[in-house]
Image: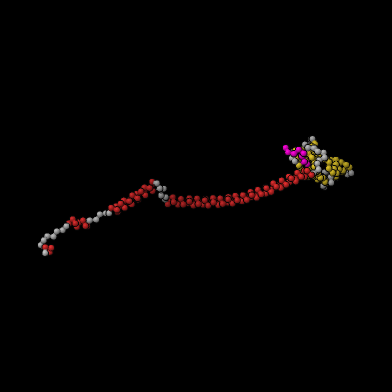
Amino acid sequence: MGLFRRGGPVVFERHAYGRRRSWTVPRWLLWLLAGVAIGAGGLFYAQEEYLPPRLTPAESQQLQAQLGKVSAERQRLKLALDQATAEAKSARADGERLGAELAEARQSVDRLQKDLALFDEVMPPDPRGGAVAVRGAKFANDGGQLAYHVLLTRERKGGKPFKGVMELAVAGDRAGRNETITLDPVDVNLAGYQHLTGSLPLPPGFTARQVTIRVLDRAGGTMQGMRVMNVR
């Protein structure tokens, strides 16, 4: 009965109502905002102090142009490298081919030296002997000239080559008369052997019959070898 009394005073709890209506910022939100602020400040500081400065549009365009030049130069160098590599391969192939040809040439020289050694053994010796031997000769009248082929060998091989001249004293006839003429000297440079070939002019109407071969250390000097051969 006392609960529904009308005459009693009504009491309001002011403090309890005020506490229910008040609102405070959560502490986690404050930490989150503080972290975002610190992170943004650190990023700005790092960018200003340690990272490269930001480029302007003009600087960016200039950098792109330089990058294009570098790329073009890189492509040019690559093409040059490819060409140099191809040339090196070609040169290597040529070197291998030349090496094979050189080996074959050396074998040919070895065979030739053996043939010459055998030829030197089987050729008849110079009956007169001498420092320079006349091992063989062939002469022929050839249209007013004397064609000759003379083989000289050096008895003392090795050392300094012999240098001198070969003189040809030619006996023959002209207009029914016997004559002997001496032709111009021929230079001799003899190490082991030397083939002297060529032709020398004869006087008009002269026909050679016999040739005396004289090898001298110089024109008009000391004779080093001699042999007499008929003209065929």
Is residue 96 visible from the viewing direction of this image?
Answer: yes
Is residue 100 shown left or right of residue 199?
Answer: left
Closer to the camera in the image, 152 or 72: 152
Closer to the camera in the image, 230 or 64: 230
Q: Residue furthest left?
A: 7
Is residue 206 visible from the viewing direction of this image?
Answer: no
Residue positioned 35% across, 50% down in the render? 39
Q: Is residue 156 in the magenta section?
A: yes
Is residue 11 shown left or right of residue 226?
Answer: left
The magenta-colored residue range is 152-160
Question: Where residue 123 sits in the image (x, y, percent)?
Answer: 79, 44
Q: Note whether 163 is above or below 38 in the view shown.
A: above
Closer to the camera in the image, 138 or 65: 138
Residue positioned 56% across, 50% down in the render? 81
> In the rendered image, which quarter is residue 122 located in?
top right
State which quarter of the image contains the N terminus. bottom left
Residue positioned 41% across, 48% down in the render? 52
Question: Where residue 140 sits in the image (x, y, percent)?
Answer: 82, 46
| Secondary structure mostly seen in the magenta stretch | loop
Question: Where residue 182 sits in the image (x, y, percent)?
Answer: 82, 40
Is residue 114 shown left or right of residue 179?
Answer: left
Q: Is residue 64 in the magenta section?
A: no
Question: Where residue 15 sits in the image (x, y, percent)?
Answer: 18, 55
Residue positioned 82% across, 38% down in the render? 128
> How is the model colour-coded?
secondary structure
Q: Residue furthest right?
A: 176
Is residue 112 shown left or right of residue 142?
Answer: left
